[in-house]
Amino acid sequence: MTSSIYIAGKWRPALDGAVREIRSPADGTLVATVSDGKIEDALAAIGAARSAFDSRVFSSWSWNDRSSLLAKIADLLERDAEIIAHLESGDTGKRIIESTYDVADVAATFRHFAKLASAHHDRSVDSGLPHVTSKMTYEPIGVCSLIGPWNYPLLQISWKVAPALASGCSFVLKPSELTPSTAIHLIKLIEEAGAPEGVANLVTGSGAAFGDTLTSDPRVDLVSFTGGLPTGKRIMIKAADTVKRVALELGGKNPNIIFADAPLDEAIDFAVTAAFLHSGQVCSAGTRLIVERPIHDQIVNEIVRRAKQIRLGGPNDLTAETGPLISEGHLKKVEEYLAKGLEEGAKLLVGGSRCTSEELSQGWFFPPTVLDDCNTNMYCVQEESFGPILTVEVFDTIEEAIKIGNDTIYGLSGAVWSTNPITCERVSSELRHGTIWVNDYGPYKPQAEWGGFKASGNGRELGEHGLQEYLEIKHIWVNNSPTRSGWFADRN
Ligand code: NAD
């Protein structure tokens, strides 16, 4: 779609006419051609969002009406689920079944925020004075720049678009330049559901070209970003000049801690999934396996055996269990990361070099890889590879397990496996990460807040807080019987 920029209710090409080809990471085939927006396009989109917001065309809708809009979008997502899943798999190379699960989660996200919006109300505050009423009102924050990543393209932007609409904001959406197709489709559904012109705007193209415009323009009130740490830091700096609200969902280096008394069969199975699902391109991937010394060999041997069996392939290969990395550039980064780990003394147990078999050589496939003999001083333990690389560390005491699990600049998620409830309770309370799974790995619910401690980000998405992020809170004090204050003497 070469007219994939949507501003003030109209689809159009980039002002300079540039287009960008989107190619499948699984086999290099052309899956879409989209407009390649630039600064001028972003400025026009921000202008449209600002005008729509200032006109109150949408913020004046009742909470119930906005709730109905979200419910309608959820219905349309479910109607188009198959189309959307194919678009998502085309851009990302992930299996159709995974994209299908993602679309269901996106619809559930819209339904969650629809429900929150329908229940939303102002709050009265006890003024302590009979002639005064005092209340807190919740108003949309204004114009939002919503910037998404490529790993779960539609899901991650839905966590921003749904609360922005629920609260009555206007926005400019910028999906990753690698995976824009489902964002384009979502905007079509928002249009079909009846959002007023100028409320939802979309600019496709690269962050390097116009990201700074979206994050520094004075007409923008909030930036919500999901992506890498370096981009997140840059956004905070760009947004500082106009003191914008900034919500960041950044990376993770997530500990998966297994004690010797854990249900081992299940722990091993989930450790494999946590590390290699979507070829490790998951912010909450369990890429740091931390095992109690006596069970190290048993756990690692079994994980290696399982890793060797994982079948790689593109969306059209129905026997595939996981897909490719997103791009050649990302594959090279994963290779460099692995090379550093080996230089540092990590021991390669399985995987380790890109897939060159005939059926995979046209795509960016990297096999499940396990590095043993790791410790917290290593680059490969501290830095996110965002690929299918699992590092293994050992511990001897619960204190050591917690220390290792917290020895990271990140704090997104982690897991603890043990049959001892006291162990689980202590580890889950002392790990400094935004989500902790006990004898499980990976589930999340739209009703529960998601986000990171430390360098994993600022703020929370989903849950109730995910809506608060898009609201300004105002205190309205009404004196129904004003009298003089008498503070200063009136000398006349
Ligand atoms: P990225 O930071 O390279 O890009 C993310 C988005 O930012 C893209 O849309 C990109 O175009 C845009 N961008 C680039 N430069 C920009 C700039 N100067 N200003 C504004 N926007 C700019 O990240 P990525 O490679 O797309 O995603 C991978 C990263 O995302 C990983 O680190 C991963 O952990 C993280 N992630 C985190 C979560 C979470 O919930 N915490 C979820 C998914 C991904």
Image (tube, rainbow, N blue to C red):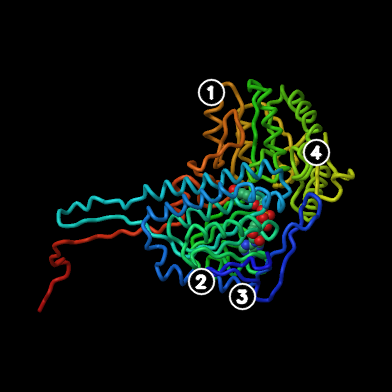
The three-letter code of the residue at mark 3 reads: Glu
Q: Which residue is mark 3?
A: 40
Q: Which mark is residue 346?
A: 4
Query: Viewer-nearest of labels 3 and 1?
Result: 3
Residue at (69% x, 32% y) in the render: 271
Q: Considering only order in the chain, which callout, 2 or 3, is on the residue closer to the N terminus?
A: 3
Q: Which residue is mark 1?
A: 421
Q: Considering only order in the chain, which callout, 3 or 4, is on the residue closer to the N terminus?
A: 3
Residue 474 rendering spot, x and y as whole percentages: 34, 59
Q: Secondary structure at mark 2?
A: helix
Query: Viewer-nearest of labels 4 and 1?
Result: 1
Q: Considering only order in the chain, which callout, 1 or 4, is on the residue closer to the N terminus?
A: 4
Asked whether the beta carbons under mark 1 and mark 2 sit within 8 Å of each other, the answer is no
Check disc 1: other Cα within 10 Å, few if <14, some if 14-19, many if 20+: few
Query: Viewer-nearest of labels 3 and 2?
Result: 2
Tally of numbered tags = 4
Residue at (43% x, 60% y) in the render: 168
The one nearer the camera, 489 or 197, is: 197
Q: Considering only order in the chain, which callout, 2 or 1, is on the residue closer to the N terminus?
A: 2
As measured in the structure, the alpha-carbon distance from the residue carrying label 3 to the one carrying label 2 is: 12 Å
Asked whether the beta carbons under mark 4 and mark 1 sit within 8 Å of each other, the answer is no
Residue 165 rendering spot, x and y as whole percentages: 47, 57
